Image (cartoon, grey):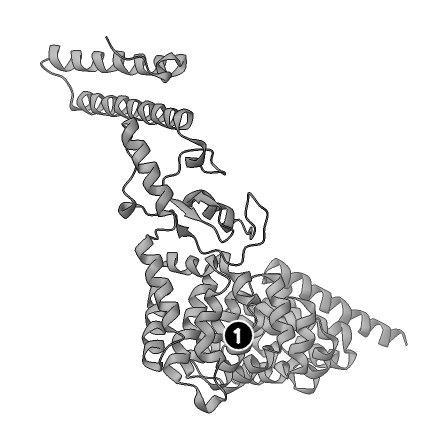
Amino acid sequence: MAKTGVFESDPMVMTKATELKKELQRLVRNIVDDEDYRTETIDQARETLFALKELKMKRRSLSLKLRETVLCPEEFKCPLSKELMRDPVVLSTGQTYDRPFIQKWLKAGNRTCPLTQQVLSHTILTPNLLIREMISQWCESQGLELPDLAQHVNEEGITEADRDHFLSLLEKLSLTLPEQKDAARELRLLTKKMPSFRALFGESLEAIPQLLRPLSELKSRSSIYPDLQEDIITTLLNLSIHDSNKKLVAETPMVIPLLMEALMSGTIETRTNAAAALFTLSALDSNKTLIGKSGALKPLIDLLEEGHPLAMKDVASAIFNLCIIHENKGRAVRDGAVKVIMTKIMNGTHVDELLAILAVLASHQKVVDELGDLGAVPCLLRIIRESTCDRNKENCIAILHTICLNDRTKRRTMRDEESAYGTISKLARNGTSRAKRKANGILERLNRAVNLTHTA
């Protein structure tokens, strides 16, 4: 007599199984009885058989799960899932949880113990080998199978061996210089190739300070080892790519000062990667404010002025992102951004990126004054006239519109350009929708000024 499982009493499951069996019988009968059966019929039979197998496996899995949950001792159940623990781990408070569920809790940004509500001193998860062995023995006595821990991989793709190796590399960063260099190089490679290793840095509040220790303990720039600095700064860049790390990385006290130091003193690759890290971290508005207040715009602008081709795009991207918030616009202006940017544009260097920054900065009153003194108006009009890039034309006319509204002395130059080439009128007809609006706004101002002059 067949055993009656818990889910055999589920009408929906039973109905689904009956339908699949009937369909399978029909298909097999067609194959057996019809000499000229179609190959599609075999495919349909195979798919139906596979669906029946899947249903059976699910029913078995659910039945075992229910049996585990009903029968297992309470101390073997995870406080979060209320199910039998597969990979019990101990939190810093001493409480034990099943790894996938406590990891989900921590990844949601929680830094307290779910049971005790204590603030965690760190988020390293330690395997509870005693509970694991007790669960294994209980499962054996009940005829249940528990997955082999050696084969266990969490949803981030990290094994226990990976985690142990990660912790050993962090420890090496406090040892001799050769060991520091080896560990830093390996962490750089691992965080580049394996996104899961980036997530490991979020499990402990001490992981990033440990990474930075070789740089943070140096007494002066002259004692910096360029290859070690490059590997650590590049690892920071790799970490900052991971969305869950952005806030943690930026708010670790030594990160931004060390990135600023790298912008000023590192190899060109180090400086470029430091700029890229600041750009990536500035995806969060709270980080934009933090980075701006730290004074990081000045070394970024200095690096932009140097104009090394490897660094230009990353530096420009970082400055653009930071200047999206109003308070950083003033900082960039005070740090000399407008002159540096306008000089580069006039020289034809990275015009696309730098026009985008200038368009963002143009809403600041001091920028209008500086642009007038730097001869920006003829340059911007020439770009509109000669460029084939709609985005560049749009940024140029947006800047000119702001100048037209706030500096009457530059309207004459615009009128002369319009008389000679019809540059603004052409853009008002053929530009993007934003460019048309700005161009028409300028034309209205220019026409109004002419009418007022004639009236007078």
Mark 1: amino acid: Ala
Per the image, the residue denoted by label 1 is: 316
- How many numbered circles does the render carry? 1
- Tell me if residue 313 can be seen: no
Q: Residue at x 70, y 81 (%)?
A: 413
Q: Which residue is farthest right?
A: 456
- Give 430 or 183, whichever is nearer the viewer: 183
**Residue at 40% over, 78% down:** 230
- Horizontal side, residue 270 vs residue 367: left or right: left
Nearer to me, 448 or 357: 357
The residue at the point 55 percent across, 74 percent down is 256
Query: Badge 1: few (under 14), some or many (20 or more) residues near its Cα, within 10 Å?
Result: many
Query: Could you tell me which residue is drawn at 62 percent across and 74 percent down?
Result: 358
Query: Where's the C terminus, which quadrant?
Result: bottom right
What x and y, as percent, mark residue 199? 43, 57
Visible in this render: residue 284?
Answer: yes
**In which quadrant of the rendered view does residue 30 lie?**
top left
Secondary-structure class at tag 1: helix
Q: Measured from the top left, where is residue 391 in percent x and y?
A: 55, 66
Q: Quadrant of residue 447?
A: bottom right
Q: Position of residue 139 (x, y in %)?
A: 31, 32
Displayed quadrant of residue 338? bottom right
The relative height of residue 372 versus residue 207 in the rendered view (above or below) is: below
> 298 or 68, which is in the foreground?
68
* Left or right relative to 159: residue 293: right
In percent of width and height, residue 137 lies at 30, 35
The residue furthest top is 1
Quadrant of the drawing holding the N terminus: top left
